[in-house]
Image (cartoon, rainbow, N blue to C red):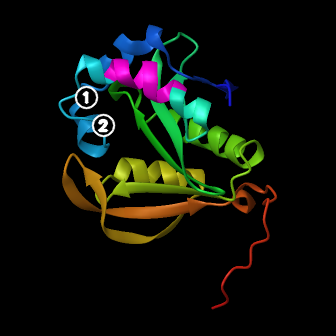
Amino acid sequence: MDPVTLTTERLLLRTVDRRDTDTVYAAAQDPDIQRWTTIPSPYLREHAESFVERAVPEGWATGTMFTFGLFLASGELAGMLGITMRSLGTGEIGFWATKEHRRHGYITEATRAVAHWSFTTLALDRLEWRAEVGNTASRSVAEHTGFTLEGTLRSALDNNGVRRDCWIASLLPSDLNLPSTAPYLPARP
């Protein structure tokens, strides 16, 4: 699939490329991004180069990962968001915000737009969110977007060689008033 560009009220969501290497590298120096995400730590310039020049285009080309940079009208990077395909019809969303653009609702806005796109264009029937237990900022985004918290998975997240417990939540097309591509029969209590 060729990369797509999405727009929201305040953001331009587009793939990142070589012109964004310095910006991605600088943003990823934030200790909170390194602490709560699974990017390499320390984050070196070659990590940014590999990400924007290889991982992002390969993900789009193979349909395995769809990465968006979240840009303000000024062209400033507000964050990153990606969907990684986990199985047929299921993707996992991950995101981070730059330090200066946290608590402005940008990640929630982008998550809603990309979720809608994933259900209508990728034909996903389930979008999962996972975050290390304690990452309350990420959990807040998931909850504000409409994800349903499903529980805690023990030792389910590897963050730089350390196994950690993580929360898991899901968003279904029906949560956004969209049809599913496959029938869904929920469990009865």
Amino acid type assigned to the residue bearing label 2 in the image: Ile
Residue drawn at the location 35% of the way across and 17% of the way down: 49
**Which portion, as a residue range, is magenta?**
48-57
Viewer-closest of 11 and 18: 18
Quarter of the image for residue 132 reads bottom left
> Across the whole image, how many numbered discs are drawn on residues?
2
Q: Position of residue 98 (x, y in %)?
A: 37, 27
Mark positioned earlier in the residue sequence (2 or 1): 1
Residue extending farthest to the bottom is 189
Tell me if residue 52 is in the magenta stretch: yes
Q: Position of residue 96 (x, y in %)?
A: 40, 36
**Residue 30 bears which disc, if any?**
1
Q: Is residue 131 left or right of residue 90?
A: left
Q: Is residue 6 left or right of residue 23?
A: right
Tell me if residue 46 is in the magenta stretch: no
Quarter of the image for residue 12 reads top right
Q: Is residue 11 left or right of residue 26?
A: right
**Residue 146 bears which disc, if any?**
none
Front label number (2 vs 1): 2
Viewer-closest of 31 and 117: 117
Q: Is residue 187 above or below residue 175?
A: below
* Main SS of residues in magenta: helix
Q: Is residue 105 left or right of residue 115?
A: left
Residue drawn at the location 63% of the way across and 39% of the way down: 114
Q: Position of residue 105 (x, y in %)?
A: 51, 37
* Crowd tier of the residue under label 2, counting other residues whose Cα lies within 10 Å: few below 14, some 14–19, many 20 or above: some
Residue drawn at the location 17% of the way across and 30% of the way down: 42
* Crowd tier of the residue under label 1, counting other residues whose Cα lies within 10 Å: few below 14, some 14–19, many 20 or above: some
Q: Position of residue 16 (x, y in %)?
A: 50, 20
Amino acid type assigned to the residue bearing label 1 in the image: Asp
Q: Which residue is mark 2?
A: 39
Q: The N terminus lies in which quarter of the figure?
A: top right
